[in-house]
Amino acid sequence: MTLPSRIADTFSQLTRRAFLGRTVGAAALASLLGETASGTEPHFKPTAKRVIYLFQSGAPSQLDLFDHKPKLKDLFAKELPDSIRRGQRLTGMTATQESFPVAPSKYKFQQRGKSGAWISDLLPRTAIVADDLCFIKSVHTEAINHDPAITFAQTGAQLAGRPSLGAWIAYGLGSEAKDLPAFVVLLSQGSGNPADQPLYDRLWGSGFLPSRYQGVKFRSQGDPVLYLTNPDGVSTTSQRRLLDDLAELNALKQADVGDPEIATRTAQYEMAFRMQASVPALTDLSKEPASTFELYGEDARKPGTFAANCLLARRLAERDVRFIQLYHRGWDQHTNLPKQIEAQCRDTDRASAALITDLKQRGLLKDTLVVWGGEFGRTVYCQGRLTAEDYGRDHHPRCFTVWLAGGGIKPGITHGETDDFGYNVVRDPVDIHDLNATILHCLGIDHLKLTHKYQGRYFRLTDVHGRVVKDVLA
Amino acid sequence: MRTRFLLPVVAGFTLALAGTGQAEPVRFNRDVLPILADNCFACHGPDSAKRKAGLRLDREADARKAVGTEGASELIRRITSADPEERMPPKGSGRELTKGQTETLRQWIAEGAKWEKHWAFVPPVRPEPPGVANAAWVRTPIDRFILARLEQAGLKPSPETDRATLIRRMSFDLTGLPPTPAEVDAFVADTSPDAVERLADRLLASPRFGERMAWRWMEAARYADTNGYQTDAGRDMWRWRDWVIEAYNRNLPFDQFTIEQLAGDLLPGATLDQRIATGFNRNHRGNAEGGVVPEEYAVEYVADRVETTSTVWLGLTLGCARCHDHKFDPFSQREFYQLFAYFNNVPESGHAVKYGNSPPFIKAPTPEQARRLERLTDDVATLERTLSARRNEEDDAQARWEKTVKPAELPDWSPDRGLLTYLPMKLSDQLNVRDGKPTLRPGKIGMGLDLDGRRFAEHSTVGDFGFYDRFSIALWVRPRSLSGALVSRMVEEPRGEGYGIHLVNGKVQVHLTKRWLDDALRVETVEPLKTDQWRHITVTYDGARLAAGVKIYIDGIEAKTNVLFDELNQTFQSKEPFRIGSGGGPTTRFNGLIDEVRIYGRTLDANEACVLAVAESPAQIIAKPTANRTTAEADKLRAFFIAKAAPAEIHDAHEVVYAAREARRKFAESIPTVMVMEEMPKPRETHVLVRGQYDRPGPKVTAAGPATLPNTPTGGNRLDLARWLVSSDNPLTARVAVNRIWQLHFGTGLVATGEDFGTQGTFPSHPEMLDWVATEFVRTGWDVKRMHKLIVTSAGYRQSSRIPKDAPASDPNNRLLSRFPRNRLSAEMIRDQALLASGLLVENQGGPSVKPYQPAGLWDELSGVGDYVPDTGDKLYRRSSYTYWKRTAPPPGLSTFDATARETCWVRETRTNTPLQALTLLNDVTYVEAARKLAERVLHERSTIDERLTLAFQRITARVPTAAELGVLHRALERQLTDLRSDPAATRKSLKVGESAIDSRLDPVELAAYAAVCRLILNLDEAVTKE
């Protein structure tokens, strides 16, 4: 099915609901479509049907993972030159630090795969799939603190109130999955820094879009989806009967008052009932073969780990869920960075690589876009105590690394470049809007045209910015 | 869905109407302006920076030439040109005119291209209600407007709905709760001609009215119980929420309601209530994240106030003019900042307090609390008077005692109330000396600890305090060098986490540190100490997290201090030992003598600090002739006498005063605070911010209202602005306010875009009616209850919501109101209905927010710093208006039903229909428990199956089920009875859901079966719908 008709379908289905059972002139309906469809018309064939976004919350250090800066070894503890810092603002945590000593990464970097991408030894498994990945080293953002930065990355605005990336996509493209939501969210807590950083419902919220487009959290404790399980003492048979009785009573009502919304409600109950079966089936990993856990690691057996969520992400992708958003917390390493980042990499490296391998094996990588990245980078200068073995890094919005893989992305390339300090972008800058525009592009959506009118304005995910990064497209 | 498609549907309606051949002349405001605004203004509108070809189409004089005349219109030529270079709107603009729109423009020009000022910017003129053919239908003036419009479109109104539906509709609309069966019966039986009016009066007089109205106002005011960024910790604004409920209930006129919330603090002789009201513009989020740039968020808060205020009162999207001139409406960027200037004078910091309220805030006792505080204050005063009256008696008693006492037998003594630890520097002190050998030398009293800049002493357990704790530390010091840590409990790194008393260049510094550089508190004495002199230091802290709560006494006298840093946001409690002579590692060890360390678990007062600094023992003081004693010595002796030696009645009298003071203090501290608006004595300078950025100030501006609107204030303060908002000059406030009242009842406002009355907003469905209602609102003294009554007693409101088979195709969305709209109940109504119908609802008005059921783990999985802990008992069953609102993780049972997150201002009614809603109603303990309690109720109150099922159905739908419906319920019950009889385990389990007790008088199988049927009823479409 081509995208244009899907969007039109979603649209007319929603619109038609208001007209069901009415004698509406075809002309009126057509004029309606003519009045509004322009906002959501896609323009080209997508290269990805779905997205898996592995969001690394707290901001991983690009300098210790991807952005190799060998010259820094000689500058250990030397003051960061003003020519590099250029008076750019710093956070309130370090702005008044007496000095800004350079903290080179203590980790070894090697060139990996045919593509020769530099990856640190913290990520041995990611290194193996390096040729499938496209590294953008020149991503930068506006915000300097977590809340506004992650909100910006996920909604295109630093302040609350806008729809999230996944909500926009669900709004624009609707759902391909029959018994599952279009937009699913999975959370995991890193072992690096247990309390930081908090997440917010708004990150997968629908903002001013109708709430049907918001992400649905699949949880690792309690019900996998809120209120999914029947109340105690209520069997599936009993629940089914209740729904049948409900449908019958609702139908009687509809015959009386003639409101098509009643049929819609009954349909939503049916969808709910299907989810009661489909979600547990999805989250039940007992039928996964041993080879799966060899690939993702034993962590994948523990609900709520990043590894388990990566495995779920693959299972969701198989079921055509449109937007699968993972969040892994714990990357906020102001002090004791080495200890914390090692723990974070143990959480994520194997499973991230496994996901790529697994999708590829199953033929899903070619139409699944995978994104790996955080909300900003970390400073080359040390926050707190600096030794050869121990250091910390503050927030750094000027550059960080994100990798993309799969549907429509050029594998095995590196895009963009930072200076010798890993401080400023010197080639091919990519801002958050560009990144989001590129994600939409892979899905066949022109980011300029996916709009929603609210408060008299046509809002879009990329605000008044955004430029598709053509160089990373296959 | 409504949000997304309402707009096109309205436009479609207009076109369809035009297409049916009803020759209606084009109206500029309704038909033409929206097309121009939407398609042309981005480049040919108010934004001077983006204007192309110097052409403006938003002002008649500038547009005349381009518009031209029929047959000679450049505008028509360009929008119909086949040449892509010429064609407007240009390719790539994302805009395209439909045929219908082009035709509308053509017709407009053919009809003479009449121009009007945007309707909403012209003050409403009260129209005469129009004449109608079917005058018998009319009950109120608004019905004339509705009917005239219907008749014009060839439509008829629907018949009046039945009484049961009407009372349910009115009860929800005015109180947010359904009627009881008895109330339904009484209303159905009431045949008097004014039955509806009296019902309206009864509902409007109910205290539930305020709770119902407050919900929407809280959404508009972005009210919540948390700060909204990052950690999203708690704040206390419920006193403002209760003010709103109460204001609605006492029917505070809307103009006063406005003035008090926007500028109550500036009213002459502002009352506590009027100051609480100003919490409205402190309800915005506050950022306390470590490392924020305060200037950045200071701007965000003010911008939020401007945007919220302009949305709520003006229905304008002024936020669009923050970075550039407004694209569609005649508001310049400069005007945004002129308005900004009114709200920019709050003595506040962009870096909010993480836990609790951010300044400025005030103590806001409830009337009952105020009375109690007054009583406690009186108690203290009375007791103190009694005590000072006994002064002579005490003197005499002390003199007698001094004569008889044997000084040699007296112990040494210092104030010991709340003394947790006393370290006289003896071997028994359980101190471990590190980095050197324990060395004692003669100290101030007995031996003292001699430190050499390297060694220090540790005690593993004492002095464990956090930032809410009240504590004091006292010690004698004799420094050899003027820098070094005296005592601490902090990480052994420079500026480590924890607390410490340090000597820095002779000055005494108190450090309370979570994270140095941005989350700490530092206070320093002005006068430095000198080397080789014994000095006494007492530091007290009152647990209030502010530098103002730290006092340093040197030799018993409160020292002048400078605040070096006052940004403490998180607790400084650490797992480190208590150290003497160290704090922050080896580079800052103390060199000198330390003696007599005392740690107290309370805030010592000035007298105690003074007495502590007297080294002489009571015995030594007694030995001095009275005249030779210093005041401090005399005080110490008196304190000792009262504490240890005085007759019981004197000792006790002092204890009673102390207890009374403590009781008063504790009660005063328990009084809630509320953030309020305040004005700095000297207004902050306001600048245009280039591209809206906090760090790019442009030209300076002073406060003023937008020039497009009539007679806006120039200069002045918030009060002037608030008064203008409710003045007759302002064309918007009354319209915007009545539109929202309308929307509360009909789901959609007369202006469908309630948040936007600008040129991009929708044209009113009934412009004359909007103006009539708006002027009526003002004419009747902004009487809110009266407006509600006007609406609910109208014939338009009383119509059936049944959709007839031959529903008019020309009005698919029922904008002309040929029937009452059938809408889903809002989130809070769905929950509150279940609580009321089941008898669980606990109707206490006001008070701190409560935490009803919520699935475990929802907070914790987002932040890892503590989960939601549900309340128990009554607090589980309060109305949803009192539910604790955490913005980053709002209550899922409510947000699933479209309750807004309260992060930003929201003024629309939104309704969706999703599978998650189905899951919530089916499986959330709230509804499962309510079903059981409803079942209990009907089992007790009725005796036959039919009666019981009917009553359960009635309690939810307000009507009697039809025979067919009753048949389905019967069948459902029978099946449940059969199943549950054979499954006692399932029966037991199903009854255990929820905290409320199971009624053991009832047969469990019967109860469970009825509960299952009640659950079915609670899930009916009709149950969650206002018909």
Image: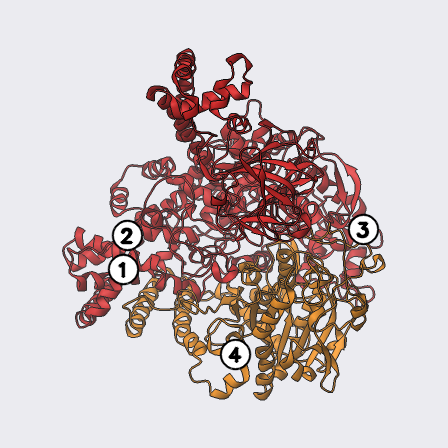
Chain colours: A orange, B red
Disc 2 marks a residue whose amino acid type is Ser
Q: Dot 3 surroundings within 10 Å: few (below 14), some, or many (20 or more)?
A: few
Secondary structure under tag 4 reads: helix
| Closer to the camera in the image, B12 or B1025 | B1025
Q: Chain of mark 1?
A: B
Residue placed under numbered mark 2 in the picture: B838
| Closer to the camera in the image, B169 or B913 | B913
- Residue B1014 - label: 1
Q: Residue at x 41, y 58 (%)?
A: B803
Quote the CA–CA distance across marks 4 and 2. 44 Å
Sequence-earlier tag: 2 or 1: 2
The reply to whether label 2 and label 1 mark residues of one chain is yes
Q: Dot 2 surroundings within 10 Å: few (below 14), some, or many (20 or more)?
A: many
Secondary structure under tag 1 reads: helix
Of tags 3 and 4, the one toward the viewer is 4
Q: Dot 4 surroundings within 10 Å: few (below 14), some, or many (20 or more)?
A: many
Quote the CA–CA distance across marks 4 and 1. 40 Å
The reply to whether label 4 and label 1 mark residues of one chain is no
Quote the CA–CA distance across marks 1 and 3. 62 Å
Secondary structure under tag 2 reads: helix
Quote the CA–CA distance across marks 2 and 1. 10 Å
Residue placed under numbered mark 4 in the picture: A311
